[in-house]
């Protein structure tokens, strides 16, 4: 091995490039056999980590990389969440993100205590694995190819974006307790939780509003600078609230929600860039966290990790979800599916690095126990999403809306957008000529795709069942066009 630069940097970049290529190439086979793709990234990191020298293992670097990765993933999730979902399902998702997290932590902690852990260590373990993981949930749901009922899918995604702050607060508080730096008191703890959430929401809204003003009022010389600006807003949304003792992760999600529901210039380009960054963040953070694990310590944690993973998936999570969603009228099947698909991923492993960095006794063993729980949890529920959809009957009827083959990219914010439909035989427009359709003012059919062929639309063109139709429409007329072209109202 050569020493000095640029050789050392070249070797590191070569290794990173090869790991990224392996991760991307293995993503497709993992999807076919039903294993969540994020787990593949984690296992590749574990495999590589078993062959590298111990002094390359850096928990502090992994914590920072994981934090940045989670910020990018939450920001991307917020950008793609419509306000309509937030308004309708914020209440149940918020209860799941708070009370269900605390309840899950207590149930898992009780099981860990019965398995021989000290009570405070058991509580810390429960807190670490109590929240679902945004990266695992987003990628598994969107990669599974199933169409969930609106409130089931929206509740799952909202919960995974909102519940990290509670797990972070619980983990930091219990870590302090184990170090003996401060005595536990319930009322100050609840006040600290409320303060972090309020600061996170408040600064998230403020940064989202400022970002909207910047994006809509300031003209930049190149389209590529808009994603750079939104990336800066994502980093700012985490940094500022955290400095002021608020929840940075919650602020990131809230700021992204505000931005994603505005008419932004170069919107499709911004979303595409953040989608790519979120995937890169997922790959990187799972690879880095996988490098931290030691196979021998994982094997030692095996039987307890398996038991705790089963308690989490079969007892703790289902019980808390059922109790928390009961007042909101969710059926037992919907609650069962939401509980089953509450996947764990990089967030618990990331949180498990904090006790190690803080110097908590036996924190390294606790880290490997959490790692084992996450892997088992990802394999069992994560690999059975399609099966669970059929078992619990939560799939939305109708075919999936096709991916648009047309889109508008412009630096200026335009008053139109393109939406796409796959025509149902019962749709109002099916069987009619394009020239006689009563389209709203400003709306027009731009392209028709039939039998994998792109066809120009003329007044005499007859729309047939199964056609993919791409329509330009003003936002205020979108609902009327959706009714005409047969878009089903989600359950």
Image (cartoon, grey):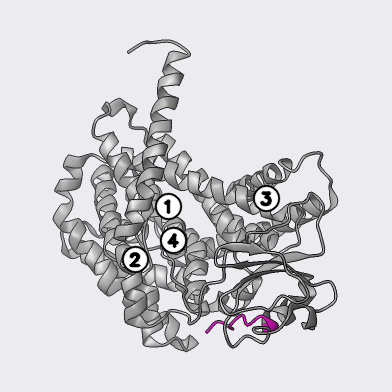
Labelled disc at residue 332: none
Distance, label 3 to label 4, CA atoms, is: 21 Å
Distance, label 1 to label 2, CA atoms, is: 14 Å
Can you see residue 165?
yes
Residue denoted by label 4: 143
Distance, label 4 to label 2, CA atoms, is: 28 Å
In this image, 327 relative to 108: left or right? Answer: right
The number of numbered badges drawn on the structure is 4
Q: Which image quadrant for residue 107?
A: bottom left
Marks 3 and 4 close (CB-CB < 8 Å) = no
Distance, label 3 to label 2, CA atoms, is: 40 Å
**Disc on the earlier residue, 4 or 2:** 2
Q: Around disc 3, counting alpha carbons within 10 Å, would you say few (fewer than 14), some (14 to 19), or many (20 or more)?
A: some
In this image, 139 relative to 82: left or right? Answer: left
The mark closer to the camera, 3 or 2, is: 3
Marks 1 and 4 close (CB-CB < 8 Å) = no
Q: Position of residue 311 (x, y in %)?
A: 24, 68
Distance, label 3 to label 1, CA atoms, is: 37 Å
Question: Helix, strand, or loop for circle 2?
Answer: helix
**Disc on the earlier residue, 3 or 1:** 1
Residue denoted by label 1: 172
**The magenta segment:** 483-491
Labelled disc at residue 105: 2
State the residue at coordinates (18%, 63%): 307
Marks 3 and 2 close (CB-CB < 8 Å) = no
Q: Position of residue 113 (x, y in %)?
A: 21, 62
């Amino acid at each position: 091995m050569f020493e000095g630069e640029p050789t050392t940097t070249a070797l590191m970049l070569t290794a990173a490039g090869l790991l990224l290529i392996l991760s991307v190439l293995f993503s497709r086979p993992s999807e076919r056999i039903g294993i969540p793709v994020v787990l593949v990234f984690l296992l590749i990191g574990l495999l590589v980590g078993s062959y590298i020298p111990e002094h390359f293992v850096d928990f502090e670097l992994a914590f920072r990389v994981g934090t940045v990765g989670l910020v990018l993933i939450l920001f991307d999730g917020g950008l793609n969440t419509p306000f309509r979902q937030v308004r309708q399902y914020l209440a149940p998702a918020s209860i799941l993100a708070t009370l269900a997290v605390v309840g899950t932590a207590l149930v898992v902690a009780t099981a860990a205590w019965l398995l021989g852990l000290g009570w405070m260590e058991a509580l810390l373990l429960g807190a670490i694995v109590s929240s679902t993981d945004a990266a695992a949930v987003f990628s598994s749901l969107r990669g599974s190819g199933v169409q969930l009922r609106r409130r089931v899918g929206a509740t799952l995604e909202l919960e995974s974006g909102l519940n990290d702050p509670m797990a972070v607060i619980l983990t930091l508080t219990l870590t302090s307790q184990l170090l003996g730096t401060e005595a536990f008191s319930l009322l100050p703890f609840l006040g600290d939780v409320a303060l972090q959430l309020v600061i996170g929401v408040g600064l998230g809204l403020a940064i989202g509003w400022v970002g909207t003003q910047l994006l809509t009022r300031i003209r930049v010389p190149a389209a590529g600078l808009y994603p750079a600006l939104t990336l800066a807003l994502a980093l700012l949304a985490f940094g500022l609230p955290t400095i002021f003792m608020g929840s940075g992760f919650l602020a990131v999600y809230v700021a992204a929600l505000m931005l994603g529901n505005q008419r932004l210039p170069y919107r499709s380009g911004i979303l595409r860039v953040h989608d790519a960054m979120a995937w890169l963040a997922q790959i990187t953070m799972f690879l880095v966290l996988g490098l931290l694990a030691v196979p021998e310590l994982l094997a030692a944690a095996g039987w307890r990790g398996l038991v705790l993973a089963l308690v989490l998936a079969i007892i703790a999570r289902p019980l808390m979800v059922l109790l928390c969603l009961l007042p909101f009228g969710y059926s037992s099947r919907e609650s069962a599916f939401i509980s089953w698909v509450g996947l764990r991923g990089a967030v618990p492993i990331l949180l498990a690095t904090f006790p190690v960095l803080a110097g908590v006794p036996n924190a390294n063993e606790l880290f490997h126990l959490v790692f084992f729980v996450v892997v088992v949890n990802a394999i069992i529920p994560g690999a059975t999403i399609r099966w669970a959809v059929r078992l619990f009957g939560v799939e939305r009827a109708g075919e999936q809306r096709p991916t648009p083959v047309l889109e508008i990219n412009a630096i200026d914010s335009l008053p139109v957008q393109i939406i796409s439909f796959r025509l149902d035989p019962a749709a109002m427009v099916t069987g009619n000529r394009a020239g006689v359709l009563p389209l709203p003012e400003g709306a027009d059919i731009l392209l028709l795709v039939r039998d994998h062929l792109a066809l120009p639309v003329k007044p005499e063109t007859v729309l047939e069942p199964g056609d993919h139709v791409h329509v330009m429409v003003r936002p205020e007329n979108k609902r009327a066009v959706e009714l005409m072209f047969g878009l089903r109202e989600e359950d």
